[in-house]
Structures are given as C-alpha cells and as structure tokens.
Amino acid sequence: MRGKDVVLKNVSMRFGDFTAVQPTDLLIEAGEFFSILGPSGCGKTTILRMISGFLVPSSGDILIGGESMQGAGPHKRPTALIFQSLALFPLMSVWENVAFGLEMRDWPKAKRRERAQELLEMTALADQAEKKPTDLSGGQRQRVAIARALAVEPAVLLLDEPLSALDLKLRQHMRAELKDIQRKTGVTFIYITHDQGEALTMSDRTAVMRDGVVEQVDTTDRIYDTPATAFVASFVGENNVVRGRVSDVADGFASLESAHGNFRALNPGGLTARDEGILFVRPEKMTILARGEHGENAIDVNFLRRDLEGPFVNLFFTRNGDVFAVHLTNTKTAGQDVSGETTIAFAPEDGLILAAGELADD
Amino acid sequence: MTSLLRTFGPSLTAVILLLTGLWIVGMIVAPQLIMVDKSFWYLDRGGDAGALSVRIDSLYNDVDLLGWDKTDTEALEPSAERDLKLVEIEQQITEKKAEITELETREIKPKKVYSLANYTLMGAAHFAIFAKTIFAALAVTVIAFIVCYPIAYSVAKLAPPGKAAIIMLGLIVPYAINELLRIFAWLMILNYNGVINVMLGFFGMEPVPFLESGSGVFIAMVYAYVLFMVFPIYNTVETLDTAQIEAARDLGAPMWKIHLRVILPHAKPGIAVGAIMTFMLSAGSYAVPYIMTRGIAAPWFTQLIYNKFFESNNWNAGAAYAFTLLITCTLFIFLLMRIFKIGIKDIAR
C-alpha cells in the first residue's frame, strides 16, 4: 500500500444559507499523518465527507494523487472512511466484516478469508475472526474497523473521531497503535478530531479549523509553540490570557498595556502600536519568583489552590478576578511552600502577543 | 413481580393481576379451550339426525293408526277373537310408544362421542378451497413485501425527517376509513359493470369477470392488508445506523448489494412481524371474501367455517375447520421462520 497526496483547491461547502466550509486550499502530503482539529461544528467532518465523496463540494476541486475527484462517488475513490460509530456490520462475523470490501470486488471466498486473516493478524485479532463484532471490546472493534478499511487497499485513510467512544487508557493505547499502523502501511491518514491531545501526539501536521475556516496548518510543534491566531492559541493547550493594547513594538517583540500591568512578549503577527492584543503564556512557562524579587513581566497575585495532576503540579492564583495558572514538574516538594501573596513571571520569548480575536470557549 | 409490587403498591398490583388474569383466562384460554374441546366430539344421534326425526314422526303416525284400529276393533261384537286382537293392538301401541320415548331421548340428549371425526370431514372440494385460501394469503404477503419494503426504506432512510412524518400520516389515513367501505370501493371498481369494465367497454373490449373469477377477492385483500407490512419494516429499518449503509457504499458495494447484505438482514425481524400479520389477516379474513364473492364466485375457507357454525348449525365441525386453519397457518409461519433463519427472539427484539 502506498499513500497518495490530497489537494483541496478552493473547496467550499454550503447547506442552503449556511456555509459549513469557506473556500479552502489544503495540501496533504502522500504518506503523512494529517489531523484536522477543531471544535464541533467547525466544518472538519464536512471536509472529510467531501474528500471521501459522500458530499459534493459547492465549489472547488479535490485531487487525490493528482487526479480530480469530480463526479467520483465514495466507492470510486482510493479512500476508505472509518466512521465515528465505526459502523461495523453487527450481523456479520469479524472476518466477514473485514472481507466485505473484497466480497464487493468479487474475490473468491477462500482468498477473502485468507486476506482477512492477514489483516486480522496485523491488527492482533487473529483469534477473533469467527466472533461477532458485538462480542469484542471497544479497542478490538476499533481495530476491526481499521482492518476492514485497509482491506480495500486505500491510498488515503479517513478517520472521523474513531477514538472518541473509548476510555482514556484505551484511547492513549490506540493512538500509538494508529500511528504504528500508519507507519507500517505508508497510507496517508487524515484524522478528524476535537481532541487536541490526539492531534498533537499522532500527527505529522495539523490543521486547526474554526467556523469553516482553516486558521493554521503546521507541524504539531509549531501549532503548540507558535500559534498563528488567538483562537489557535486558546484551543490548543492551556494558557494564561491577558487582554490589552499594544503600546510599543521593537525587534519582533511587543509591549502590552493591561489591567495587570505592562508585559513584553514575542510579536509574531507584526502588531503595531495601539492595536488590540492578547497575551498568551503557557502555564509551564511561568515561574514563581522568590519573595521580594521583582522584574520584567512580573505579576503580583494571590495563591488560590494547588492541584496535583500526576507528572504536574498545577498552581492557581488570582488577581482582580482573573485566574493565572503555573505548571510545575512534580518534584515532591514542588509548590508546597507557596501561599498568600506571590509574584509570578515569564520570560519575554516565552509569551506571545497576538491580535485580539475570538477565543475557544472551554 | 416484586418490581410491580414496588411500583404500584399491593392494592393496585392486586387489581392489575386480577384484570390480567381475567383477561387471559376469560378472553383467551377459556374460549379457545371450549372450541378445542368442541372440535373433538360430536353428538351421536344414531345416524342421521334427519332420519331420526322422520323415524319418530312415522312412529307417531303408527300409534295414531293403531288408535283407530283399536276404536274399530272395540266397535265389534265382543268375542274371544276381539279381545285377543285388542290385546295385540295394545301391545303394539306400548312398544311403539316405548320406541318413541327412546328415540326422543336420543334426539334431545344425544350421546357425546369424542373422536377425530370432525377433522376428517373435509372433502376434496373443501380442501381445494382451503388450499386456495392459504395460497392466496401467501401471495398477498409476498406482494405486500414487494410493495412495502421500498416504501419503508425510502421513508426511513431517504426522506427528510419532517417529510417522513407526513408520508407516514398519509399512509395511515386510508386505514381510518372503515374496512367495509374500502372493500365496497373495490367492488364498484371491479364489478361486471364497474369502473374498469365500463372503461374497457369504452375502448371496445370485452368486460372482464373480476369478481366471478375470484380474483376480486385477491385484489381487495392486497389493498386491505398491504400496509400492515409497512410499519414493522419501517420501524426496523429506521433503527439501522445510516453510517452502515455509507460504510458499505464506501467499501464499494452497489445499492442492491447493500440492501441484500446490510439492510435486509437488519430489517428481517420487522419483515417477519409484517409477514405474520399480513398472512394471518389474509388467511382469516371474512369480510373481504364475503363482500367480493356474494355467491357469484366460489367461497373462501373462512366462509366455509361461518357456514358450518351458523348454517349447518354444527359448531363441532366449525371448530374443527377453524382449528385446521389456525394450526396450518401457525405451522406455515414456523416453517417460513425456519427457512429464513428467524428466531422468536429476533421478532421480540
């Protein structure tokens, strides 16, 4: 199996008066694990259904492996879709499910059975072939769905939040497994999710969508470290957020005047003085200053509470009703001595000042 | 039982159980048992009931004649010969009267004989009608399925939700009209000088004897019971995850194979329920054949049952006929369920 690239050229989708996807250009490379991340209703599933052929775009063209998919139905495309509900056929046995696509291609039964067994071996289900899907666990059903989709040797595998029904442990395990299968087969994976953790851990690149618009397409590291918009910054990962107005810009940095004081941080969007801006600082980039110490980007806050989250310790502070979070690596004593009035701070290169815009509501 | 008690309390539970018990015993078990019992015995009147009453009548005649003989003999002059003759006549009268009493007792209180005789009564003519009725019910069921499955599928999976409700309402409306009226409508359409034949005549064609040939019963029956198949199928198809249809499409299945491999197997319980309803209603229909044949075409089996009960006044034979139909239909359904691999549990699903 070899992956193919997927190109969206000016693709949009309208349902009556409602525009689900604004005109979008997207290039997904052959053999990459590509995620489309966004809150529900952002149009990510619509894009997936357009690529798979269940929806016809209102405008634009989709090319898979350089070929236009105009007029091609779902079965004519080198894609296979894994549904959110998995959509396994409950009345067929596991191997019949896996071999369904081959049955439709008129393979003889013995060959079908053989091929299904190979795929079940690859997904560690070899001894479950005769069972019904309902007799399997959630993770096993997941793998049956993957094997069924891979049986038709697609060049592009489309996954519509297939892990959302699993519990946390299994979800983490399946992430690794999906990534592994993708590497083994070389098939292009396009993965739809609203879970930033899934997108960050599995993908080579991620597109973040909001209200039918792709806000940023980038490697996962860059999505996390240098989000392009306020929405991306707030949707991916946690943040300390301060709204204000840009007072001064210099050498890629900007200064922000706010109710909590003046802050200096990176200015990747090229804001100019008097622009409305929002400061984003990741909680793990914040430090707690020693008592009496003060300096650039320091905020005087009151200690609120300490939450233990395994590898992290989350410390929460308040100032005039706004909450600030600081993540410390859990070193037994981390944050134990914090109480009362405290000063927290961050380095200018660890903060981002982005143009004011809508934030992800969480 | 405990959950019933917990939900409704002791007094209400007692009422519920009592009413349920009364219903089961009084409305289901008792009438059926009485009918089953009736079907297994007959009244032995020592041969034909008609012959019996003729015999009694002739005996009364004999007694009357003997009475005149006696009067005549008494009018003769007294002699030993006369006395001897009188004694002889008296003796004959007594014998005849004794026989009358015995026969009358037999007529009023005939002997109840348990046997399978009622079930072996059916002659070739009645059996042919029986077979025709079963075959027609089967044909109605098949036609109902062919008509209803596409309707149920399109309403459940293709129509937008708002429209689906309107279509279903539209399907129910004809059923709000009295069944007799619906059948009469077909009578007017199919009659020898009905709508169709008038139109055929208009084009210079010979009229078709729909009613006389018995096909009228079949047509009206299809119309009367066809939609009892729609709702059970609709209900099962509707529960099918649409993603399964899409998954099959995505995996390259053409539409007819999706129906064959995904939708039909899922809808099987609904089809089974619909088929049972249509089959049983058609096989047991009385109103449709009664109105559509009216003596101008051969009767249907339900009419034979009716005649046994209320025209021959032979409830025992009627009960046996009715049970023959019931048992045959039931066995038939089990046979079909076997062939199509449908379990009782599937239907209850």
Image (tube, rainbow, N blue to C red):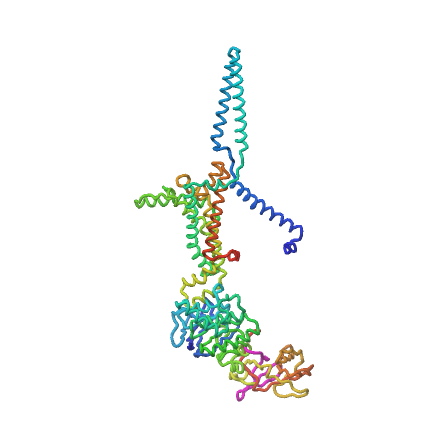
Which one is nearer the viewer's eye here, A30 or A22? A30
B235 vs A72, nearest the viewer: B235
Q: Quadrant of residue B340?
A: bottom left
Residue furthest toward the top? B77
Tell me the magenta residue range. A236-264
Left or right? Give the position of B251 relative to A280: left
Observer able to see residue A74: no
Is residue A53 shown left or right of residue B80?
Answer: left
Q: Quadrant of the N terminus of chain A?
A: bottom left
Residue A147 rendering spot, x and y as whole percentages: 47, 72
Q: Nearer the viewer, residue B237 or A123?
A: A123
Residue A80 x/y as whole percent: 44, 71
Check if residue A238 falls in the magenta segment: yes
Residue at position x 55%, y 32% in the image:
B109
Compare residues B260 and A253 and report the one nearer the observer: B260
Magenta run includes residue B214: no
Task: Note whether B67 is above or below A8 in the view shown.
Answer: above
Left or right position of A149 against B194: right
In the displayed structure, A138 sits above or below B334; it is: below
Q: Of helix, strand and loop, which mostly describes the magenta segment?
A: strand
Percent x, y of residue B234: 48, 57
Q: What quarter of the picture does the C terminus of chain A occupy?
A: bottom right
Q: Can residue B155 be seen?
A: yes
Count of marks, rendered view? 0
